[in-house]
Amino acid sequence: MSRRFWSELTRQLEPYTPGEQPRVANLLKLNTNESPYPPAAGVLEAIKGIGEDDLRRYPDPTAMALREAIASHHGLKANQVFVGNGSDEVLAHIFAGLLKHPRELLFPDLTYSFYPVWCQLQGVRYRQIPLREDFRIEPTDYPADAAAVIIPNPNAPTGRLLSLEELRQFLDGAKDRLLVVDEAYIDFGGQSATAFLGTYDNLLIVQTLSKSRALAGLRVGLALGSVELIEALERVKDSFNSYPLDVVAQRAAQASYQDPAWFQSCCERVVESREWLADQLQALGFDVVPSAANFLFVRHGEMAGQVLFQALREEGIIVRRWDKPRIEDYLRISVGTPSGCERLVDTLGSILSTLGDHAHSRRGSMP
Ligand SMILES: Cc1ncc(COP(=O)(O)O)c(C=O)c1O
């Protein structure tokens, strides 16, 4: 009944559906690209060190200590770093503050499905550019007279990576078109576009601590760019919520940057497991899209995506699938620990042989 109080905008929203987080024993959760490893040990220490006064007071609204830690990690100044409550919030501010123009925003047709949702929320004009047949992003497909382009690199959910040269094509081709590169998965083998920040002022980079830093539960994301682009985001933030990062998030995130060795070793282990998993899945008859992320986008030649998705679920393994043209037969599978990857491969092996036998026995019974 009280839906009558909904605004017209609220009525029209088609919200993003996040991957589910069921609390079930023995579940193998490979659906939201979380890290299979714990965060750096210093992160929990930092959280344990938080005292009553820290909680009693408001946190630093500028999150300066954290921004300085991030800036020094990337060889930038603190005023080139913006932080927010997960990169989702950072992106939401980017859509509001930098992507809403009379000219269009461009992004791939198959990409992070939150982008069109923010466009709707903020009234951003946009156009989706089809990925090439092999899911490649082709820079020359993006008209130079658009207001902006946003692309994840590597792309989600495909995992395909653009090289720095291809990114340079985007940047050189259109100096008045802002390029936002969402680097949620860049730490698993890609090269960050941060190298270009000194040269190009039409570049903004978004990163997250949710994946490679194993802190999805903490909700910290960031943007890196010119002082003026960061200032725009500060203006939006301070018109929305001055304290997006609580004291726990600020201290814990800072500690994560103080342990580069742990970060490096976790990323390397994920990459190793990804390569092993890709080989195993190929041996089981899957097409595997080349991935530079902590997930694989795969399709089985003979088994529908929905059937495999459901069969895995019945075995306590959840992966992600979209009911969208072109990708309905694909599964996006997060890379887990070596034992998680083995369980997945063993389970898929028995699913395929059981379902395959059924298909055979049906065929066999025909005259
Ligand atoms: C491409 C991409 N960007 C941004 C995010 C948001 O991450 P978070 O809000 O946890 O920082 C995700 C999460 O899945 C993602 O896949």
Image (tube, rainbow, N blue to C red):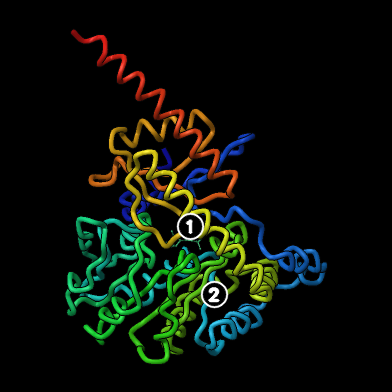
Residue beneath label 1, please?
Answer: 294
Residue 303 in the image: above or below residue 61: above
Graded by Cα atoms within 10 Å as few (under 14), some (14 to 19) or many (20 or more), the crowding at tag 1 reads many
Residue 290 in the image: above or below residue 150: above
Quadrant into which the C terminus falls? top left
Whole-percent x, y for residue 80 in the image: 50, 86
Disc on the earlier residue, 1 or 2: 2
Query: At 25% from the left edge and 80% from the top edge, which residue is drawn?
Result: 169
Quarter of the image holding residue 153?
bottom left
Say which of 246 and 250 sits in front: 250
Seen in the image, is 147 located left or right of residue 26?
Answer: left
Mark 1 or mark 2, whichever is nearer to me: 1
Whole-percent x, y for residue 99 in the image: 32, 74
Q: Identify residue type, mark 1.
A: Asn
> What separation in Å lies between label 1 and label 2 (alpha carbons)?
23 Å
Q: What's the mark number on residue 83?
A: 2
